[in-house]
Image (spheres, rainbow, N blue to C red):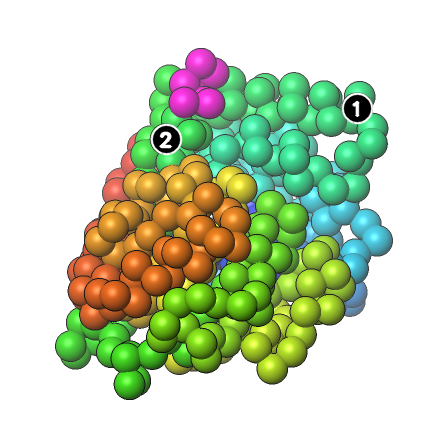
């Protein structure tokens, strides 16, 4: 029997809030429900918010089962105000505590964060390495926040990403952009979907009170690539469309742009900061439309969770978003400007219940049991 070592810059419980952690959590939930006997062969390698926990093997309870967990780095909760690169700290932590991992050639390394690959490969060359790519690695250069001005470091990082792709035993990917980008480096590519826990909505759709839109929602990391400002402008600028006069926007999330965007706080725009996953669902239940405006994405978990709540979506058509949504049926496309967001909202308003019903029906495709059954079966090729 081999172990499955899962690497991510998270605590596997509630930090950081986002689609990547949700995806990993749904896989672990699937294992707990369908293959509970295998959970004892899993080691989670992540980060902690508690300095005294670094480098100490412990047990964490998820979905009624216990998992071995080794935090190798300290994370700062405020991701928008960090002084150090968490990726770099994670790499250093893997080196520092490598003896605690006790990796053998029988083990399978399941890597969700690319900086783990090089370090682990260095001290265990003969074990198996499976990558789960949550979006094209080649988009990461744009978000390389701590070393943007160092051209040599950026070029070295891209070369490192290519090396990972060439040497991985198998790569799970979410979208056509990643498939296009990776196909020249690796032949063993497996297309999968992000997964969601789908709630039961009796009518399978939402209804607008008095036929008016009131609550627009954004959920995600507040980075430049999420292009949140045009969403705000679509709400606060004079809106020429009937039925949209009372629009209010809730912005859920944290990140490096928070301190700039918070200046828009008003009676029409509210910022929550980072909130736990169960609270995000509360905001989705109260919202009328989910708006995403990213410059690049994989298949965003936020969108999948939104449609599972019967929320129509307004979004840019980048990365795998066009694979997840059916524009004109459960969603409308925007070109990232405030004006196009307003027009998209108007189209949805005209046939709101139809968009809502289609969104909920579409979400069934992403049920965590269906998606993770495929992931588990392919992993078993290497995780004996």
How far from the left and from the top, in percent, is residue 268? 57, 77
On screen, residue 180 above or below 21: above
Asked which quadrant contains residue 222, the reply is bottom right
Location of residue 212 with respect to 40 vertically, above or below: below
Q: Is residue 124 placed above or below 203 in the rendered structure?
A: above
The mark that comes first in sequence, 1 or 2, is 1
The range drawn in magenta is 180-186
Can I make out residue 132 in this image?
no
Q: Which residue is mark 1?
A: 151
* Disc 1: CA contacts within 10 A as few (<14), some (14-19) or many (>=20): few
Residue, x 39% and y 67% (percent of image)? Answer: 241
Disc 2 crowd, CA 10 A, few/some/many (<14, 14-19, 20+): some
Q: What percent of the width, then of the height, locates residue 257?
A: 70, 57
Residue under label 2: 176
Q: Secondary structure at mark 2?
A: helix
Q: Quadrant of the N terminus?
A: top left
């Amino acid at each position: 029997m081999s172990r499955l070592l899962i690497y991510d810059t998270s605590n596997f419980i509630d930090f950081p809030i986002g689609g990547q952690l949700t995806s990993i959590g749904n896989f672990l939930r699937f294992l707990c429900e369908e293959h509970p006997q295998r959970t004892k062969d899993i080691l989670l390698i992540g980060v902690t918010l508690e300095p005294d926990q670094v480098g100490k093997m412990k047990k964490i309870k998820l979905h009624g089962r216990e998992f071995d967990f080794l935090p190798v780095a300290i994370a700062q909760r405020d991701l928008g105000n960090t002084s150090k690169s968490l990726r770099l700290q994670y790499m250093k932590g893997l080196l520092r505590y490598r003896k605690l991992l006790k990796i053998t050639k029988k083990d399978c390394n399941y890597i969700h964060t690319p900086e783990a690959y090089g370090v682990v490969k260095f001290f265990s060359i003969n074990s198996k390495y499976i990558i789960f790519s949550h979006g094209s690695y080649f988009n990461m250069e744009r978000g390389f926040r701590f070393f943007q001005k160092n051209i040599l470091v950026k070029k070295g990082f891209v070369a490192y990403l290519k090396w990972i792709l060439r040497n991985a035993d198998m790569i799970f990917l979410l979208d056509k952009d990643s498939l296009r980008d990776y196909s020249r480096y690796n032949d063993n590519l497996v297309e999968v979907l992000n997964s969601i826990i789908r709630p039961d909505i009796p009518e399978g759709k939402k209804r607008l009170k008095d036929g008016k839109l009131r609550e627009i929602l954004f959920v995600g990391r507040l980075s430049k690539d999420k292009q949140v400002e045009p969403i705000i402008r679509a709400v606060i600028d004079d809106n020429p469309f009937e039925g949209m006069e009372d629009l209010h926007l809730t912005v859920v999330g944290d990140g490096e742009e928070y301190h700039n965007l918070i200046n828009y706080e008003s009676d029409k725009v509210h910022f929550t900061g980072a909130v736990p996953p169960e609270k995000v669902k509360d905001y989705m239940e109260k919202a009328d439309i989910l708006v995403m405006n990213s410059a690049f994405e994989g298949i965003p978990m936020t969108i999948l969770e939104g449609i599972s709540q019967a929320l129509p979506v307004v979004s840019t058509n980048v990365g795998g978003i066009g694979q997840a949504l059916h524009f004109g049926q459960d969603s409308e496309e925007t070109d990232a400007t405030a004006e196009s967001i307003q027009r998209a909202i108007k189209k949805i308003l005209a046939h709101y219940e139809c968009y809502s019903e289609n969104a909920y029906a579409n979400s069934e495709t992403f049920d965590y049991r269906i998606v993770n059954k495929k992931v588990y079966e392919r992993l078993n090729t290497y995780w004996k």
